[in-house]
Image: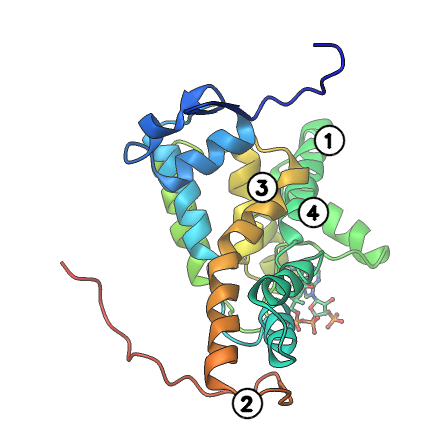
Amino acid sequence: MTDHWPTAITDIEPNSVRVRGYDIAELMGRISFGQAVYLIIRGELPDEATGRLMESIIVASIDHGATPPSAMAARTLASTGATLSASVGAGLMSINAHHGGAIMNCALQLGEISERATASKCSLEEAATAQLADWKNESIRMSGFGHRVHSADPRTARLFNLAREAGAFGDHCHTAMAVEAAFASLGKPLPINVDGAMGAVLADLGFEPEVMNGLFMIARTPGLIAHVREEQTRMKPMRKVMPGQHQYDGPEARGLPS
Ligand SMILES: CC(C)(COP(=O)(O)OP(=O)(O)OC[C@H]1O[C@@H](n2cnc3c(N)ncnc32)[C@H](O)[C@@H]1OP(=O)(O)O)[C@@H](O)C(=O)NCCC(=O)NCCS
């Protein structure tokens, strides 16, 4: 076995596929996609509530309309005649520190604030106020806060409620609330955006920061596929893809069937 390199993710044998040790045919139809994503990344099967929380994180970020840079990049590439994979790939490549990629940085920054509170024996809000002032002097923004469109991101409150239900509302989520309060008392109310809420919840679930932006990529991929197919089927090739000049003409607001 010495000339083989190790992998602990999936074991393939003739007529057998085992993901992290579990028979994939047994998992199919029994576990949710959220549980499967947790299992493949973390190596252990989570309980159903954690799976639901994972899935709500994925649903929260499935799309945010035609203007985000990832949708623009994917549509621009599609308009040149590029393939589905190349166009979706371009969208995924635009997920970085300032778009969809604030998740990891937010989790790390929340950790720093929480450590400061412990070290200085002060409240989370006092530590947040002091840390935000230090970062402002260094021209560092608090990742996961602020939004170009929303003053109260509708996804954040729902995600935090689901985290409470799953028993996963921990130190990072409390710190995020303290940061929001600190911004408000500094006279600069900035909402926790979906990246920030994801960073806090994923950190409280114990995800390593380096993998967090991947959750956004998983979530946004179906949205990007929809944008690319719409571009390929409804728009003329090589058009100027202008941000903000689109008009929604999909279904009217509707409720879920009861
Ligand atoms: C999302 C974002 C780009 C929206 O920015 P915007 O609404 O266009 O706001 P601006 O960039 O014009 O900034 C306006 C002011 O708010 C401040 N500000 C905005 N977001 C801030 C943040 N996250 N941390 C600290 N200050 C922030 C700016 O410094 C600026 O202050 P000034 O008026 O004293 O110069 C911005 O809030 C940001 O950079 N957030 C952090 C990255 C992030 O979370 N990205 C994911 C978005 S879903």
Q: Is residue 67 left or right of residue 35?
A: right
Q: Which mark is residue 120?
A: 1
Looking at the image, which residue is at 55% across and 58% down?
193
Q: What amino acid is at disc 3? A: Thr
Q: Is residue 40 left or right of residue 47?
A: right
Cβ atoms at labels 2 and 4 below 8 Å apart: no
Q: Quadrant of ligand 1?
A: bottom right
The residue singled out by tag 2 in the image is: 236
Along the line of sight, the residue nearer the viewer: 110 or 51: 51
* Dot 4 beta carbon under 8 Å from ligand 1: yes
- Along the polypeptide, which appears first: circle 2 or circle 3? 3
> Residue farthest to the right?
138
In whole angstroms, how far apart are the C-alphas of marks 1 and 3? 15 Å
Q: Dot 1 surroundings within 10 Å: few (below 14), some, or many (20 or more)?
A: few
> Residue farthest to the front?
14
**Which structural element holds mark 4?**
helix
Looking at the image, which residue is at 51% across and 70% down?
150
Is label 2 or label 4 in front? 2
> Residue farthest to the left?
258
Is label 1 or label 2 in front? 2
Q: Is residue 123 left or right of residue 64?
A: right
**Which structural element holds mark 1?**
helix
The answer to whether residue 64 is above or below residue 175 is below
In whole angstroms, how far apart are the C-alphas of marks 4 and 3? 14 Å
Looking at the image, which residue is at 42% across and 84% down?
248
In whole angstroms, how far apart are the C-alphas of marks 1 and 2? 60 Å
Looking at the image, which residue is at 85% across and 56% down?
137
Q: Dot 2 surroundings within 10 Å: few (below 14), some, or many (20 or more)?
A: few
Q: Which mark is residue 175?
A: 3
- Along the polypeptide, which appears first: circle 1 or circle 4? 4
In whole angstroms, how far apart are the C-alphas of marks 2 and 4? 39 Å
